[in-house]
Image: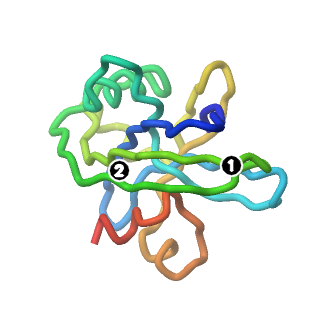
Amino acid sequence: MSETVTNEIRPLVICVFKNDNKFLAALGTDTVKKNEFYRPLGGRIEFGERSEDALRREIIEEIGQEIENVKYLGTLENIFTYNGKSCHELVLVYNAEFVNEELYEMTEIDVDEENIWYKAHWISVEDCKSGKVKVYPTGLLELLS
């Protein structure tokens, strides 16, 4: 996922793209804890950049796609350890739709995060609620309910 910044609060924006009872999220790994998790697409809000503009920029940078019908859902605060480093994030969460409807038919989507390639998948909300699939940021599922 994106770089880990320590000793500062990191402002992020993520987007929940819904597809029936699923949403799009990228697979991540904590190499210290040796666990896998999923997180919706998005990234850092730059100084002087509005969160919705950051979201549109991040989605274009990561998967080269335009979005529409952007709606703010809420903000989550997370203090956690990732790859052995302490992190503190304020995460603005949005819902949006892809302009290119073909993405909803794909089982996985290639994501490019600063020349690091990984896959995003449509994951089941029920699998997340049951604990079968771990999703971050903490509180996301409650926000979606």
Q: Nearer the viewer, residue 87 or 68?
A: 87
Does residue 100 appear left or right of residue 90 in this picture?
A: left
Residue 83 x/y as whole percent: 77, 48
| Residue name at image x 82 percent, y 59 percent | 34
Q: Which mark is residue 38?
A: none
Provide the secondary structure element on which disc 2 rests.
strand
Residue 144 x/y as whole percent: 30, 65
In the rendered image, which quarter is residue 36 located in? bottom right
Does residue 121 appear left or right of residue 72 in this picture?
A: right
Does residue 128 appear left or right of residue 48 in this picture?
A: right
Residue 31 x/y as whole percent: 82, 50
In the rendered image, the residue lying farthest to the front is: 7
Q: Nearer the viewer, residue 55 or 6?
A: 6
**Quadrant in which the N terminus appears:** top right
| Residue name at image x 15 percent, y 39 percent | 69
Q: Amino acid at mark 2?
A: Val
Q: CA distance from mark 2 to mark 1?
A: 25 Å
Residue 94 x/y as whole percent: 28, 46
Q: Which mark is residue 86?
A: 1
Does residue 115 appear left or right of residue 97 in this picture?
A: right
| Residue name at image x 41 percent, y 21 percent | 46
Q: How is the image coloured?
A: rainbow
